[in-house]
Amino acid sequence: MEIRLLRYFVEIAREGNMTRAAQKLHVSQSALSKQMKELETDLHHELFRRTRAGLILTDAGMMLRNRAEDILEMVDKTEDEFAALDEITGGDVSIGCAESHLIAYLAQAIKEFRLTYPRFRFHLFSADTDPLAERLDRGLLDFAVIAEPPDLSKYNYLIFPGTDRWGLVMQKDHPLAAKTAITVDDLLGEDLICSPQCIRFDMPLWCGEKTDQLHFIGTDNLAYNGTICVRQGLGSLLTFEHLANTSEETGLTFRPLEPALEVKMYIIWKKYQVFSPIANLFRKKLIAMYGANRSEAYAGDDSY
């Protein structure tokens, strides 16, 4: 299966129209249609279904699109890395980030690094720990910033200074807003929104067996979206301090959990990973800035 055919297929899937896709790809519609028929023949599955609204992906087409987009992203990343082999003054680095105000430390490292390497370009991808680790394992990310201790058998890591503190964002007229801190028992019977990672990892750590008694009505991966739900009266949001806008005009307020639940932020990369030159230089910059306490903050190979 040629990479070129995958690019053609993805463009058709995005456009939902053979003519528009052919125009964007600068090929004739007849040639593009022929290529897709050959691709369907090779895969022994129909990829598109024609409707009045345009071309719609079949189940097989949806599966191929997911695979093709990952493959093309990896191909593009590999080409960029090889192009950067002879250009140490710049290049691209992909970093996955959990939501945290501690990302300011990453931003500071990038800012200082670009003073020396002004053609350095960074690409941030936001998600919870599990999808970040998955993309890191598949080679789609160079680094990831995660909010739980990393798997030491797979990753090297550094720890950013400071911690994130969990708490509850609610409307200011909520009865719990009168409290200075929120306990487990306070949350019982409340409609709660939080990230999937919060349900899977952080809440069991904080409230143990009572986790099953909490009423989670929904999940979100971005605190901003969660706060909109809170403002609309859908429930209250479990999130880190500093992520939600609780200024006067929002009508929202934040109260920390009690006992305090605080987490560290780890920046990780795969053990024995072969970096592009610019990514390796950035790794060394991170180590120089945040690797002072090596015995605690770094588990790694001799390339440190």
Image (cartoon, rainbow, N blue to C red):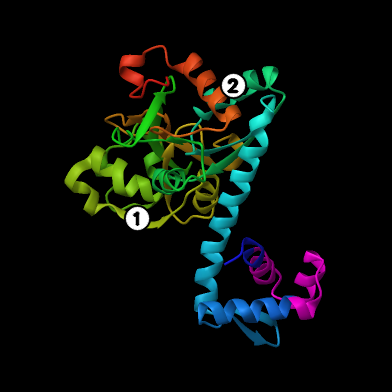
Total numbered circles = 2
User: Does 10 appear in magenta?
Assistant: yes
Between the residue at mark 2 and the residue at mark 1, the CA separation in whole angstroms equals: 36 Å
Q: Is residue 66 above or below residue 122?
A: below
Percent coordinates x, y for residue 76 in the rendering: 63, 49
Q: In the rendered view of the protein, which quadrant contains the C terminus?
A: top left
| Left or right: where 158 falls relative to 252 | left
Q: Is residue 49 above or below residue 105?
A: below
Residue 198 in sight in this render? yes
Percent coordinates x, y for residue 46 in the rendering: 55, 83
Percent coordinates x, y for residue 197 in the rendering: 36, 46
Which residue type carries mark 2?
Answer: Gln
Q: Which mark is residue 216?
A: 1
Highlighted magenta segment, given as a residue range: 7-31
Q: Residue at x 63, y 32 (%)?
A: 85
Q: Residue at x 69, y 74 (%)?
A: 16
Kind of element beneath mark 2? helix
Label 1 Cα crowd, 10 Å radius (few <14 / some 14-19 / many 20+): some
Percent coordinates x, y for residue 62 in the rendering: 53, 72
Q: Which residue is under mark 2?
A: 108
| Left or right: where 237 falls relative to 17 | left
Give the mark, 2 or 1, whose residue is nearer the N terminus: 2
Which residue type carries mark 1?
Answer: Phe
Label 2 Cα crowd, 10 Å radius (few <14 / some 14-19 / many 20+): few
